[in-house]
Each structure stands twice: as structure tokens, then as C-alpha cells.
Amino acid sequence: MSKILITGGAGFIGSNLCDHFIEKGDQVTALDNFATGFRHNIEHLFTNPNFTLIEGDIRDLATCHKACEGQDYILHEAALGSVPRSINDPITSNDVNVGGFLNMLVAARDAKVKRFIYAASSSTYGDSESLPKVEDVIGKPLSPYAITKYVNELYADVFSKTYGMECIGLRYFNVFGRRQTPNGAYAAVIPKFVIQLMNHESPVINGTGDYSRDFTYIDNVIQMNERAMLSDNKEAINTVYNTAVGDRTTLNLLVEYLKEYLSIYDPEIKNVEIIHGPQRAGDIPHSLASVEKAKELLNYNPSHDIKAGLKEAVEWYWANLK
């Protein structure tokens, strides 16, 4: 049994991590201020004696110290995501993603946790045009959000060298799956398209739809967090890993898959038209990860490709949101 702190534990990724480690018999503490997370994502855990919720903000150092006390591992998911959000409000994104991250590193150092695993981002690759994306080749960031996530990597590297901490960053590539919210101005593309199609509304694709992404199902992300947390390979520590499938799908093809899988439940969805709008500022044209480093050092083996993940995600959305 391990004691695990999951920041952002009421969010999409965080709550799935909470479920996974609770099911394994670990003691899990979730820290969340419910700015973007939801109480209903974790309320089924409230009666579990191995689960603890701390309602608080990572921008408060005292809260971070309280949450880290006695923990073996930290899975740091808390952040303000979304490139457009960071463009509209760079100050708050920086306060949470950089200031809050530094608070967590300091608190983890002081609590002498075994390992600090944190959510990095594929946005760190910036204007680098090389494909597939390899961990040690990055470009200049294209958004305030991307800057904050790259700064996280720099801080983690400094803390590992200066204080002897064990830190591993996971560069998430377009994660999707159960519990990802379709609501709000900064909703991710897959749940947003799903709910629109379910309502027979036309999804709006930014640009021509030829931009491509390495869409990554939530179960692959859970596997990466667990492998990073428990690895006893010294070469695997104090570095960053792409957390992805190693395949890319255009937005146009993505919508076709969604229409196909949703039409199983409602045949009329096949006839919903697609609208193309202006290209979104700060978007990276193409995203494709090399996952060779994770396979070699962490024995990572993605369980879901885009089609398998979408089928499960669509099933969940239909059962829970229709």
C-alpha cells in the first residue's frame, strides 16, 4: 500500500487516477479547489476509508505542505489547461501553473516524498516542425500555456539536481476519455464534438480540419503515471516522457469516427453536417509523439489506439450524458 497525493484529483485525469489507485488498495488523497474539477467526479469515493479530500488551492503554500505531509508519491495534475484560456488570461495561468507548481515542488521536497510525477504537455514542442516529436528536440512555445508547462520541466530538473528529488514529467498528448467535460468555453474537442453530435448540432472544426493530433485515451495516461511512479530503473528518473499512442488523426477523420460510433445509438447522427471555422491562434499544426523512450525505460505499452479509445469514450458519454 502506498500513500499517494493526487493534485487536481477532482478533474478529468485526476479523478481517473484516484479511481485506479483506490481500486489497487492504495491510500489516496485528492487536493482540488474545484476551479475546473467537479465534486461529482469523486463523490463515490467519499465513503472509502482509503480516500481523503483536501479542498484547497496549490497557490497557497501552507495547503501544499498540509497535503504533502506523510505522502509517498505525488501525482501532480492540478493546472489551468487550455491554450485559448492562457491567451485570454495569461496572469492566472502563470499563477496556477508556475507559482502553484513551485509550491508543490517545495512542499514535496520538505515532506521528503519518494517521487514527484507531474503533468507536462505536448505544447512544449512549440514551433518545432519535426515529426514524430522526440523528447529532447523542442521549439519555441506558441502560447502562455506552453511557456508555463515548459517552465515546470525546468523547475523539476533544477529541483532534482539541487535537492536530490526524483521527478518525472509526462508530456500529455490530447488526452480524452470518460469524465472529460463537454461544457464551458475551453472544453476539449472530443467531448465538445460528441455532445454536439448527440444533439444533432453541427460541430465547428477550426480551419480546414487537416491539423492532426496524437489523441491519447485516458487508460494509456493512467498506465504511464503508474509506470513512472513505480519504476525502479534509475535511468528512467529525472526526465520527461511523451505520453501518447504514437499515431496521429486529423480533425476531419476524428469527426468521421465519432459520427460512425455515435450512429450506433442514433442513426440520424450520420447526417449531421460539419462546419469549418477560422483557425485558432496558438495551435500547433501537427502533433505526433515518439513513445520509444517510454517503451524502453518504463516498459510502456499503450492499451488503446484512437479507435478503441473513442468507442469506449462514446459509450460512456451516451450512458452518462444523453
Image (cartoon, grey):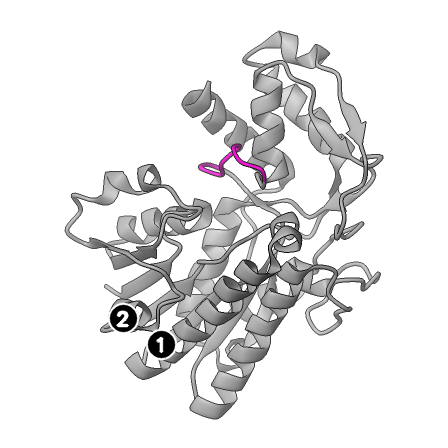
- For the stretch drawn in magenta, the main secondary structure is loop
- Tell me which amino acid carries mark 2: Gln
Residue 162: x and y in percent read: 48, 91
Residue 65: x and y in percent read: 29, 73
Q: What mark, if any, has residue 71 been given in the picture?
A: 2
Please name the residue that numbered disc 1 is placed on: 108
* Residue at the (47%, 76%) spot, across then down: 167
Q: Which residues are magenta?
A: 178-185
* Residue at the (54%, 13%) spot, across then down: 265
Disc 1 to disc 2, how far (Cα)? Answer: 9 Å
Crowding near the residue tagged with mark 1, few <14, some 14–19, many ≥20 C-alpha atoms within 10 Å = many
Residue 147: x and y in percent read: 65, 67
Q: What mark, if any, has residue 249 been given in the picture?
A: none
Residue 71: x and y in percent read: 27, 70
* Residue at the (45%, 23%) spot, across then down: 321
* The stretch drawn in magenta includes residue 182: yes
* The stretch drawn in magenta includes residue 61: no
* Residue at the (68%, 48%) spot, across then down: 214
Q: Could you tell me if the residues under marks 1 and 2 are in contact, i.e. CB atoms within 8 Å?
A: yes
| Lower position in the chain sequence, tag 1 or tag 2 | 2
| Label 2: which secondary element | loop
| Label 1: which secondary element | helix
* Horizontal relation, residue 217 to residue 27: left or right: right
The relative height of residue 291 versus residue 287 in the rendered view (above or below) is below
* Horizontal relation, residue 53 to residue 98: left or right: left
